[in-house]
Image: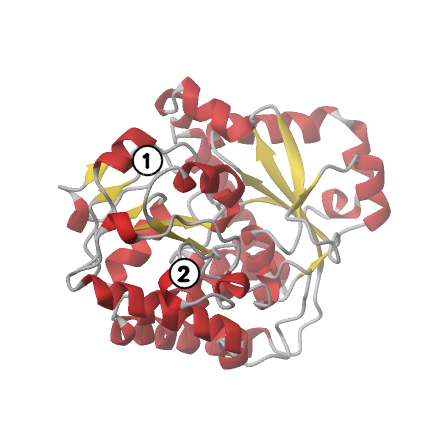
Amino acid sequence: MMSKSRKKKAGILAILLCAALSGASLSGCAVHSESSGGGSADGEAGTADRSVELMIEITDPEEKAAVEAAKKKVQALGTEPKIIATSPSTVEICDRLELDLAGVCSSTISELPERYADAETVGTAMAPDMEIVASLDPDWILSPDTLQSDLQPKYEAIDTDWAFLNLRSVQGMYRSIQELGEIFGREEQAQAMVDEFTAFYEEYQDQNEGKEAPRVLILMGLPGSYIIATENSYVGSLVELAGGENVYAGTDQEFLTVNTEDMKTKEPDVILRAAHALPDQIIEMFQEEFATDDIWQHFDAVKNGRVYDLTYEYFGMSADFNYPQALEELRPMLYPESEDGAEEAKENSDRAAQAARESQASEKTDEETLQEITK
């Protein structure tokens, strides 16, 4: 077994850089790809004309080499690695890969798998308690890459390896699942999940084939404000998978701050409203905003009754296995086609709004977590 004292501390930003190093010094790569369709960092769009296999295929030779090097490091341990997963999504991925965890995140909203009932709690996804993390002496820490800039410096301070998973899109999640499956010897479990996604999405695509893509504006609510979600965000990637055209496509950013006058120039067919934490507060904020700010009444989407609230559990900040429910919820919102479809879209929206009001998220979220969310 490789002793901790011999392991080089992680300090590598991305898997493409990791691949340039030898396996012995591979220490902390972001196990993700920057060319994963809807979740790409360069704003690549358009999944409708791409097969599912191409969307999640790992072809970059340097990426493959980095994964192989990480796999060898795990094998060199001579025992099952001690792993910590710091977000609900990464915990669920580990559960489906049948990986044991020494530590898991705490969550006021998501229910963690029963498999990890006895695992040590290491704090919230955005602010893990590094004293607890270090005390567990992990071999690997798994986190979403949306938090890499905040968490990487903390991980550099302890003697461990880490991987930041691309959870900005469903495609990115399945690429990361395949890579984790290879690294930790769970190829069979990873392939089963890939097959499940492939079967679902091929059928979903067939149902939307030939339909005109609606232009969509996505508002992501924060406590006291909101921002625009681009196609590089998870919610944006879901809209793209569903066939929608993001009116703010073409940027390399996940979120934008834009005034309503600029939004009006985009004239979206559909406006979607999602929440980043505290959905009970955010649903009230959105409803007051649309009722009191007169500019919204001039949007065609408002005039046509095509403003919808999204279910908080399905449309978060990181990809998870609720994506089939999310895509099914989106279908009538983007393609109402008939009065029945329009009514279903309204019912989905009303149900999401009611669930947000009843979430009691404000009561369950402590001040420290709220500061992390809104910083």
Q: Nearer the viewer, mark 1 or mark 2?
A: 2
The answer to whether residue 285 is left or right of residue 228 is: left
Q: Residue at x 67, y 73 (%)?
A: 211
Whole-percent x, y for residue 9 in the image:
38, 48
* Residue 19 coordinates in the image, percent (x, y): 49, 68
Q: CA distance from mark 1 to mark 2?
A: 31 Å
Q: Earlier in the sequence, mark 1 or mark 2?
A: 2
Image position of 136 with respect to 38: above or below: above
Quarter of the image for the N terminus: give it: bottom left
Give, as a three-letter code, the residue at label 2.
Leu
Quadrant position of residue 22: bottom left
Residue kind at label 1, given as amino acid type: Ser
Residue carrying label 2: 26
Check disc 1 and report the residue beneath it.
107
Name the one closer to the observer, 115 or 64: 64
Report crowding for label 1: few under 14, some 14 to 19, many 20 or more residues within 10 A (C-alpha). some
Q: Residues within 10 Å of mark 2 (few under 14, many from 20)?
A: many
Residue drawn at the location 64% of the way across and 56% of the way down: 231
